[in-house]
Image: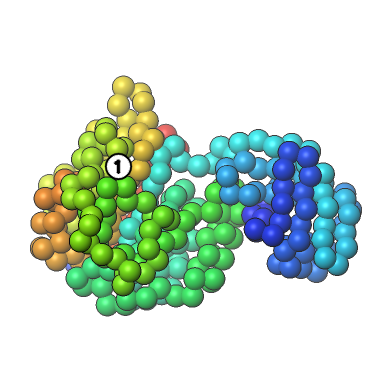
Amino acid sequence: MHRFFVSRSDHVDEAQALICSDELIHQFTKVLRFARGEKVVLLEGSGFEFVVVLQEFSVKKILGKVLSKKFCETELPLRLVIAQAILKNMERMEWLLQKGTELGVSAFAPLLTDRTERKVLGKEERLQRILKEAAEQSGRGKVPELSGAKRFEKIFFSADWRVAADARSEHALDFGDEVGGAMSAGGQASEHIVVVPHPGAEQKFSEFCKQNLVKNSEKFSGELVICVGPEGGFTDREIEIAKAKGAHVVSLGPRILRAETVALAMTTIVAEVLGEM
Ligand code: SAM
C-alpha cells in the first residue's frame, strides 16, 4: 500500500479522511490514477498510521473511510538529533538528510562552526520534500524535523535545547540570557546527551553507545545529539568548549571519514546497539 503524509489542509481522524491539499489530490488522481476502492496509508506525523479506503472523488476533495489506526513501530526508541555543520556541497547535505531519515534520525540541526564555509541551507521547501519522501519510502511514522542554522555553541548554552522550538536563524540568537552547563553528561537528569566525533579522540563511539544507551536491559529514551564537524573539522577551541560543557568527544577509528559518512555511520551504530538493525 502506498504511504502518504497528509498536510495541514488535509484531515484524518478515527473515522474518516478528507484530502483537500492540491499536492495529494494531484498525486492521487493524476499521477497514481487512484479510483474508488483504492486503499492507502495516511500519516499525520504523530506516529500513527491510518489505513484508508478512498470513497469519493471530486476536483477539490477526496473522501475516505478509515479502516484501521495503529501506532507505527518504525521510530527509534530515543530522539536522535544529527547536528551537522553545513556542508559546502549541498548535494551531499541532501543525501545525508535522505539517508539519515531512512535510518531513523529524529531531527536535523544544521550547525555554523568556525570552519563552516557555507552559511545557508538550500531551499527549505526542497529539503522538506526530501525528508517527507524518504520518510514515506522507509515506512516512518514521522518526518524528521529540520531546524534553521545554529551556532555550534548554542547547543551547550540552552537549558532546554530543542531543535524545532528554536529560532530559525543564526542572527536571531542571543547568548546573553542563556544558561550554561544545562546538559546532562550521563543522560540521567534531563536525558540529553551530546556527542562530538573528533579524529583521534580516546573513546570509541561504539563503546560509548554500549555503555550509555543500554543499562540493565533498559534502552535510553532521551535525546542524543550528535554534532558532526565540517569538511575542515572542528577547531581546538570548539573541542575545548565541548569538553568543558561535558559533551562526549569520541572517535570512529583511525580512518578520516567524510562528514556525511560520519552521521550515517553513527546513526547505524546507535540503531544497532539499541537492537534496531
Ligand atoms: N581534517 C579534519 C579533522 O581532522 O577534523 C577532518 C574533518 S572530517 C572530514 C569532518 C568531521 O567528521 C570531523 O569534524 C568529525 O566530526 C568527523 N570525523 C571524520 N572522521 C572521524 C573519525 N575517524 N573519528 C571521529 N570523527 C570523525
Between 210 and 14, which is closer to the camera in this rendering?
14
Name which quarter of the figure residue 276 lies in: top left
User: Is 88 located above or below residue 102 in the figure?
Assistant: below
Between 216 and 181, which is closer to the camera in this rendering?
181
Name which quarter of the figure residue 187 lies in: top left
Neighbourhood count class around disc 1 (C-alpha, 10 Å): few under 14, some 14–19, many 20 upward: many
Q: Residue furthest front?
A: 177
Which color scheme is applied? Answer: rainbow
Residue 244 image point, x, y percent: 11, 50
User: Is 19 located above or below residue 95 in the figure?
Assistant: above
Residue 217 image point, x, y percent: 35, 23
Question: Which of the image's four quarters has the C terminus?
Answer: top left
Rendering quadrant holding ligand 1: bottom left
User: Is 204 located above or below residue 20 in the figure?
Assistant: above
Q: Is residue 260 visible?
A: no
Residue 48 image point, x, y percent: 62, 41
Q: Is residue 150 visible?
A: yes
Name which quarter of the figure residue 61 lies in: bottom right
The secondary structure type at the circle numbered 1 is strand
Left or right? Give the position of 117 relative to 7: left
Q: Which residue is mark 1?
A: 192
Q: Residue at x 70, y 37 (%)?
A: 69
